[in-house]
Image (spheres, rainbow, N blue to C red):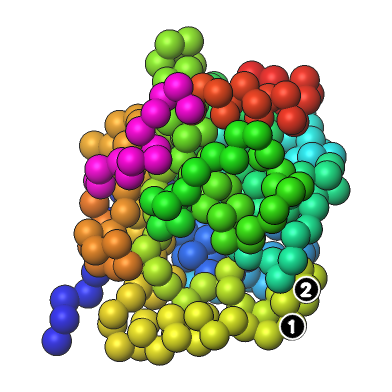
Amino acid sequence: MARRIDITVPDLTGKIAVVTGASDGIGRVIAMRLARAGAEVVMPVRSPAKGERAAGEIRTAVPGASVSTRALDLSSLDSVGALVDELRAEGRPLDLLVNNAGVMRPPQRQETRDGHELQFGTNHLGHFALTLGLLPLLREGRARITHQTSIAARSGAIHWDDLDWRDDYNGMAAYNQSKLAVALFARELDARSREGGWGITSNSSHPGVSPTNLLAAQPGMGREKETPERRVIGVLACMGVVGTPETAALPALMAATDPTAKGDEFYGPTRVVGGRPARRELWAPMASMADARRLWEASESLVGARFAA
């Protein structure tokens, strides 16, 4: 019998963790594991009903767990700003932030409420604005921030002349860009923290391949049924070829909680599609700090002064 893949999450009693995309899939596993370790978990969600179901499942599995949901639509900067205002009004330092939520490959080009290409606007700009908006609480808590990127970043490139893909739209290339942007943001955030003495650490992780809902039916995004790739991944997961949501959550958990983790590190499974989590070498598109700085400056311009660091 194959040895079960897992890690030890240290005691997190007294810590506050914010996990986006925690209403299902990998995010729900991350939230569950953090709650089991004693953290108070805040779950910003787009669907209140779905979020409450997930929170209820965590409370059932972890008696005494402190889990709450908040409203958040990462495709709306107004929604991001409302959550930022709410958490800053509460004034509690944040210890962990896991930027895990994402969307993948809508059937045709779609835009966020602010007019950005949906994948870039949700996966990167929404999390960029959220993180910068929460920076005072993150600095006060000397937080560890984990950014969930993807295998897609390995073949990603930033479409500098048209970040929102208004011309010659390619859904997969736009997704690759969005996940590369996540990784570049993680690197520049850690660099600015070190330079400015902010006291936070920023790492990125990728989950490998697992049967999550990214390619499942998403009627709200125009996808009425799951993609053929999603069905194949489900079969491969049953065969042990790729990961499960439980194993796919481990790199982000390691980045967020491993006592030896530092900043500007990249975590992923030992095989690209799955396996034990470990520190990994950066993929080539992630290497340029000049690109990371350029993306930060472009992103600041796109989200506006409301979210300036």
Look at the image and give the residue range highlighted in magenta: 279-291
- In this rendering, is residue 64 above or below 296? below
Q: Which mark is residue 222?
A: 2
Q: Is residue 98 visible?
A: no
Q: Position of residue 263 (x, y in %)?
A: 35, 30
Residue sitting nearer the eye, 241 or 20: 241
Q: Which mark is residue 120?
A: none
Who's the residue at 69% across and 55% down the image?
Answer: 169
Who's the residue at 45% across and 22% down the image?
Answer: 290
- In this rendering, is residue 279 above or below 234? above
> As drawn, which residue projects farthest toward the front?
168
Q: Are marks 1 and 2 in contact (CB under 8 Å)?
A: yes
Q: Secondary structure at mark 2?
A: loop
> As drawn, which residue projects farthest toward the top?
196
Check disc 1 and give the amino acid type. Glu
Viewed as shown, does residue 309 lie left or right of 25?
A: right
Q: Position of residue 161 (x, y in %)?
A: 65, 34
Q: Quadrant of residue 109?
A: bottom right
Residue sitting nearer the eye, 172 or 306: 172
Who's the residue at 53% across and 65% down the image?
Answer: 28
- In this rendering, is residue 157 above or below 68? above
Q: Position of residue 182 (x, y in %)?
A: 52, 42
Q: Is residue 224 visible?
A: yes
Screen quadrant of the N terminus:
bottom left
Check disc 2 and give the amino acid type. Gly
Q: Residues within 10 Å of mark 2 (few under 14, many from 20)?
A: few
Q: Secondary structure at mark 1?
A: loop
Residue 149 lies in magenta, yes or no? no
- In this rendering, is residue 237 above or below 45? below
Q: Which residue is mark 1?
A: 224
